[in-house]
Amino acid sequence: MSHGLPPLNALRAFEATARLNSVSQAAEQLHVTHGAVSRQLKALEEHLGVNLFIKDGRGLKLTDAGLRLRDASSEAFERLRNVCAELTQSTADAPFVLGCSGSLLARWFIPRLGRLNADLPDLRLHLSAGEGDLDPRRPGLDALLVFAEPPWPADMQVFELASERIGPVMSPRFAGYERLKDAPDAALLSEPLLHTTSRPQAWPNWAQPRDLDARALKYGQGFEHLYYLLEAAVAGLGVAIAPEPLVTEDLKAGRLVAPWGFNETPAQLALWLPKRAADGRARQLAQWLKNELRRAD
């Protein structure tokens, strides 16, 4: 006899058998064999040191101890079922809060938000913008959409969506447009380049695979965030460096051009969510994002 709580599986087997008054029906409801339920009942009686059932013809009858445990376990399991149902419904009703940078939100997500709401009407997506200060470990955020390089944090479930591709862009309104539009990559080494303080490695990451000396790059106007950098490029203030998905709409509309193309970096656009808070909606969203990124190719 043990003074601790019995194993949960044994209690589940007993509760189902007592409620249905049948080992066979309990086994069917629990999706296990008749023998498995019988073994759990025997283990429970040994744990408690009392008989819970007695033979009654070809069936079973609850003892006084069994009746007491039936009433207590039925009430406990019913409360658990009700609370679990409430929690499941609460999760389903709550919005899915996704964090991402302001530039990603404004330049990629918002143009596609209508399509996402039509494709995933039950998701109830809520977008939270930030720059480097968003962490899905904190309360109030379910997941994070971010450009980042592996290895991934051990406490995160990460859905890799697409390799990052970056490249120089400029506006036809830029004073140097005619001079640069057909110029080779090396022409940018003498150009005062627009850049961000939040990602100083963007230009070197583009230059190195093209056999350009990153140390020879010259920097002009700097901006705190990528969103402002791209607005400056659209305004014709110079040549900027950008992830391809964030300028797709501008390229299609002719607001920006990318004469030198794009190349991959070690980074990935990825959806992060804490492993402790796995949410089926994240997998659904990740698949939609993957499809949408392929659609833009």
Image (cartoon, rainbow, N blue to C red):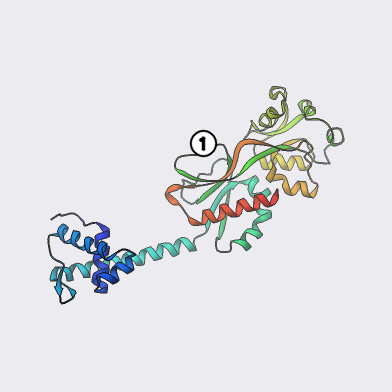
Of the pair 212 and 169, the residue shown nearer to us: 212
Residue 85 appears left or right of 132:
left
Question: Label 1 amino acid?
Answer: Pro
Q: Residue at x 52, y 54 (%)?
A: 283
Query: Looking at the picture, does residue 139 appear above or below residue 232?
Result: below
Residue 158 appears left or right of 238:
left
Q: Residue at x 60, y 55 (%)?
A: 288
Q: Residue furthest bottom?
A: 57
Q: Residue at x 32, y 69 (%)?
A: 28
Residue 92 image position (x, y, % from top left): 48, 62
Of the pair 132 and 248, the residue shown nearer to us: 248
Residue 186 image position (x, y, % from top left): 78, 27
Q: Residue at x 44, y 42 (%)?
A: 155
Query: Looking at the picture, does residue 132 appear above or below residue 276?
Result: above
Find residue 229 and report its image quarter. Answer: top right
Residue 213 image position (x, y, % from top left): 71, 23
Query: Looking at the picture, does residue 151 appear above or below residue 130?
Result: above
Q: Which residue is mark 1?
A: 151
Residue 88 appears left or right of 175:
left
Find residue 15 and report its image quarter. Answer: bottom left
